[in-house]
Image: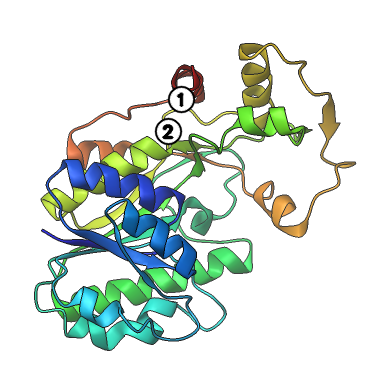
């Protein structure tokens, strides 16, 4: 089984390790720079160039022997760049058995803190999530035409080694923005990796939320992490007076509790890190 990732970013790199342990070899994927491609090739990942603006010259050859394709590139104003530039190469991939698309729980929009699952209507509140909805459907259409299963994983807020509340606290960028009643789900990158590998092995099809069990107020996470590493808890910052970019503010427009029951039932698992406390504890232990 050979896996290929369009977009070897944080989640994908972690998923390559889990998939290699599951018997996938070789593993390849795309990056935007020759420097990163060389770095990953030295780590036994067959990285090739593709920046989303033009076809990657080596992508077609890589796909020719690929059985599992994971898509981790965000759509742009023109749609999904992989379908735009490499649809013909995917058509020619005679060994293709499975597709996976990393989407976002942002496609749901705002539910005023209520619990939702995959049956909830999609009412995204920003252009980025609008594009995700369209890209999800484009991949459903393509998978149906090819006759291969497609697994859409709608990811919650991703954290992991080097990208956690600890890092923001130490960098002095963590802010306890207070919006009463606001909660977010999160997902540890190790859970993304594990679920991707298991879903690939079983060629799982369908649309699934990938989030933790316990949505929580963001300020609670910051306070808990600060106490774990002996730092002062940042002061409360009411959302009305907080300086935020339009992208940062858009996250606070969506308030919902996202159920992960479907993916756990489909794979017969529990999350490795079902809440932020367990996830932060693992990160701190790994540092030591």
Q: Mark 2 — residue?
A: 212
Left or right of 10 in this view: 199:
left
Q: Quadrant of residue 38?
A: bottom left
Residue 38 relative to residue 163: left or right = left
**Residue bearing the label numbered 1:** 279
List x then y, in percent, for residue 121: 46, 58
Please state, as top left, top right, bottom left or bottom right, where the N terminus lies in the image.
bottom left
x, y percentage for residue 115?
Answer: 48, 38
- Residue appearing at x 50%, y 83% in the figure: 53
**Of the residues under marks 1 and 2, which one precedes in the sequence?**
2
In the rendered image of this protein, does residue 110 appear above or below residue 99? above
Asked where in the image residue 194 lies, by quadrant, the reply is top left
Label 2 secondary element: loop
Of residues 54 and 240, which is closer to you in this image? 54
Is 184 left or right of 38, judged from the image as shown?
A: right
Tell me the CA gap for discs 1 and 2. 10 Å
Residue under the image location 65 percent in, 49 percent down: 251
| Front of the two marks 1 and 2 | 1
Residue that appears at 15% across and 70% down: 148
- Residue 34 image label: none
Mark 2, Cα crowd under 10 Å, few <14 / some 14-19 / many 20+, is many
Residue at the spot x=67%, y=25% of the render?
222
Left or right of 246, for residue 33: left
Question: Measured from the top left, where is residue 142 in percent x and y?
Answer: 26, 78
Residue 262 visible, this orientation: no
Residue 276 visible, this orientation? yes
**Residue 244 in the image: x percent, y percent?**
80, 49
- Residue contact at pointers 1 and 2, CB within 8 angstroms: yes
Q: Secondary structure at mark 1?
A: helix
Above/below status of 122 relative to 14:
below
């Amino acid at each position: 089984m050979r896996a290929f990732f369009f977009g070897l970013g944080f989640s994908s790199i972690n998923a390559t390790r889990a998939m290699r342990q599951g018997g996938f070899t070789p593993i390849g994927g795309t990056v935007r720079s020759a420097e990163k491609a060389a770095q990953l090739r030295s780590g036994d990942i067959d990285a090739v160039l593709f920046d989303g603006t033009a076809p990657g010259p080596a992508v077609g050859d890589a796909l020719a022997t690929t059985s599992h394709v994971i898509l981790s590139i965000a759509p742009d104003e023109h749609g999904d760049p992989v379908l735009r530039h490499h649809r013909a190469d995917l058509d020619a991939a005679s060994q293709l058995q499975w597709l996976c698309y990393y989407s976002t729980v942002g496609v749901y929009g705002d539910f005023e803190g209520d619990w939702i699952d995959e049956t909830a209507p999609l009412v995204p509140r920003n252009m980025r999530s609008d594009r995700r909805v369209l890209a999800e459907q484009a991949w459903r259409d393509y998978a149906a035409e090819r006759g291969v299963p497609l697994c859409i994983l709608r990811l919650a807020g991703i954290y992991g080694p080097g990208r956690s509340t600890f890092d923001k606290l130490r960098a002095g960028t963590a802010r306890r923005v207070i919006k009463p009643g606001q909660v977010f789900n999160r997902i540890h990158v190790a859970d993304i990796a594990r679920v991707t590998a298991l879903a690939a092995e079983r060629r799982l099809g369908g649309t699934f939320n990938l989030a933790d069990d316990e949505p929580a107020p963001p300020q609670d996470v910051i306070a808990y992490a600060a106490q774990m590493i002996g730092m002062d808890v940042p002061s409360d910052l009411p959302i009305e007076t907080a300086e935020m970019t339009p992208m940062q503010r858009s996250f606070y427009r969506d308030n919902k509790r996202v159920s992960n029951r479907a993916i756990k039932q489909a794979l017969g698992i529990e999350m490795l890190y079902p809440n932020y406390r367990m996830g932060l504890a693992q990160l701190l232990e790994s540092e030591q």
